[in-house]
Each structure stands twice: as C-alpha cells, then as structure tokens.
Image (cartoon, rainbow, N blue to C red):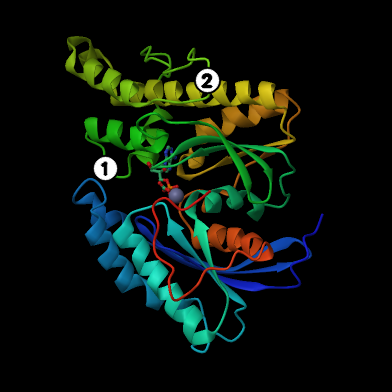
Amino acid sequence: MAPPFSMLKILGIETSCDETSVAVVSESDGRFFVEKNLITSQIDLHKITGGVVPEVAARAHVEALFPLLLEAGVARDGSGIDAIAVTAGPGLIPALRIGVEAAKVLAYAWDKPLVAVNHLEGHIYSAWLGQWQPTFPALVLLVSGGHTELILMREHGKYKTLGTTRDDAAGEAFDKVAKLLGLSYPGGPEISRLAKEGNKEAIAFPRPMLESGDMDFSFSGLKTAVRVYLDASCAKGASIADICASFQEAVVDTLVTKTMRAVSEYHPASLILAGGVSANASLRERLTNSAHENHLPFFLPPLSYTTDNAAMIAVAGLFALQRKQFANPIILEADPHISF
Ligand code: KG4
Ligand code: ZN
C-alpha cells in the first residue's frame, strides 16, 4: 500500500565509516526514486593501515562531502529539497560528526526539516529500494562490518532484536580472516572472490553457536580456528582459495541456519537481508533458496545498495519524517547509542 508522503524529495548524507555518500531520493505513490546516489570510497586510504583510522576517515569526509553535494546538483539555497536525513549513529564518532554538522548547517540555513537516521535502520530500508517492497512482520538478517543482528520488524519504525553477535560481527570476521591470510582491506569482497575458486568442504571449520538455543551469533572463535589452522603444519596442503571457501561456508551456514530457525519460530510475512555482507554471493544464493523452499517472500537490496550509501539513509529518513521524528538542528549530535 502506498504511504501518504505527498511527493517529497529528501537529501541523504552518510559519513558513518569509510564511505562519504550523498543522495537525492524522491517518492511518488509509495515508490522511491534515487535521483542521485554518489559515493566517495576511502578504501585506498585505509588499505595503507589495513583498517579504518577514525580521524583519517573524518578528514577524508571533510574533503569529499561538499564536492559531492555540488556534483549531486543540490542547489545552494536548498531549493527543490524538502528535508535532510543524516546518519547520526552508530559509527565512528569523528566520521559521523562531519555528516551531522554539515546536515545541521544546511537544515538551519535552508530552514528545512532534519531527520537523524540510525545507520542500521538505513541498511534495513535498502530493501525498499528494489522493485517490490517487504510486507510486515518482516524478519531482517542485518550483517555488516560492525553488526550481526536478527531483527523482527513489526511495522515501520518498530523493531525487536531477536539475536545479535556476542563478539565479532560477520563482516569484521571476514575482514580479520582476510588480514590473517595477507589479503587487502576490506576482506569480505577479497574472500568471496577467492572462495569461488576453492573447495568449501576442504576444511571443517566450526559453525559457532549453532546449538546455543538462542538467536545470538559469535564469530571470534571461527577467526581463531582459521588462525590455529594456519599455524598448524596441515595448512601447508590447503590453498588460500580452499581456506576462503571453507571459512565463508562456515559463516554462511551459521547465518542461514539461525535465520531459518527464527523463520520457523516467528512466521514472518517476509525476509530481508541487508548490510555490507549481503553483497556476498554465497549468502545471497543460500538465503534465496531457503526462503523459496519456505514460500517466503525474500527481499535483497540491489547490489549497489548493499554497502554504505546515502540512498538508504534518505529512504529511512522519509519514513521517519512521516512519523514526524524531527531532529533539532541546534542540538543534534552524533550518537553511537542512537535508539533503534
Ligand atoms: O555495511 P557496510 O558497508 O559497513 C558497515 O556498516 O559496517 O559493511 C562493510 C562490511 C565489511 O566488513 C566488508 O568486508 C563486508 O561488509 N563485505 C563483504 C562483502 N562485501 C562487503 N563480506 C563478505 N562478502 C562480500 N562480498
Ligand atoms: Zn553500514
């Protein structure tokens, strides 16, 4: 059903980690149109240190943000824009602050409504950027560099966390294992590229917390298992591709098994996969098949909206705007514990 937005155009700003992104998204009859979604990646910068240094990321956001606004064709007086949505947390505080301060200044100067968006909620709303839209209640598997969550979304803005990671997030595990293997940052895309050439049954890595009886995850033990394997003499016979394929299979198996258990328990009307790790081809395929077997409508963000982008923040912002969740441009601050 089309939500009553009455043709809004919103500017989205995302600077929570290592991508600076600016988007202009409009809505008509409940469909979202991404007019612009520009991303400047800092990956090359962070390859040098093998991970993100928050102050370095913040400085790069400062350099990238206003050129992106100009490139997006955003008018200097804000004409044509009805509201501004910005990621306020969670994320790296120095990085978040750059987007938040820019959004505050623009909202104040243009006298437009400002919305503070939770980055995780933004990832969930990437599922609304496809051709069809999820129905409620929706079960969400959110897997990113900082989070692994199973969330029951009863309606817009109403979330219940069913399970979370007790230590490393799924994306973090990909990045750390890639580092152990001497691969470059970020590790997820590298591991999934190499895994295509490997044998996923070559090494029996553990499936963490599969029998824990709850919906939580834990990936640090799996990372340790890879390290122990590499240290052991038997590693000499295995190719990097086999290690990548076997590690990826352990992560995907764990994520899919626990997600489908939550499906059996909560009987959602749809299933959503979101977050940077949702770019992983094996995870996409396995969850697509499992959803199909269960006759469950499955929503995957288009590949271009899986990793951090401002279009998803803009869509989440439009729904928050509809609920009249305005932020005050005088006092808004980056908030690592922003409610969700
Ligand atoms: O959502 P995202 O862009 O940033 C956060 O909010 O954290 O997710 C980034 C994470 C990184 O850990 C990256 O390695 C992982 O997503 N990632 C992948 C793939 N593409 C990105 N992990 C596995 N396979 C991929 N193809
Ligand atoms: Zn993210």
- How packed is label 2: few (under 14 Cα within 10 Å), some, or many (20 or more)? some
Relative to 63, residue 245 above or below: above
Residue at the image point whose x is 26% and y is 42% from the top:
184
Q: Give x and y (percent) for residue 249.
A: 45, 22
Q: In the displayed orientation, state which residue is furthest to the right.
A: 1
Report helix, strand or loop for mark 2: loop
The residue that disc 1 covers is: 184
Q: Give x and y (percent) for residue 30.
A: 76, 61
Q: Is residue 35 left or right of residue 216?
A: right
Q: Earlier in the sequence, mark 2 or mark 1?
A: 1
The residue that disc 2 covers is: 214
**Residue 206 seen in the figure:** yes
Q: Give x and y (percent) for residue 272.
A: 62, 39
What amino acid is found at the position of numbered circle 2 in the picture? Asp
In the rendered structure, find residue 259 and report the number of the disc placed on it: none
Which quadrant is home to the N terminus?
Answer: bottom right
Q: Is residue 176 left or right of residue 86?
A: left
The quarter of the picture where residue 188 lies is top left
Q: Give x and y (percent) for residue 256.
A: 55, 25
Residue at the image point whose x is 59% and y is 47% from the top:
301
Report helix, strand or loop for mark 1: loop
How many numbered circles does the render carry?
2
Relative to 120, residue 42 above or below: below
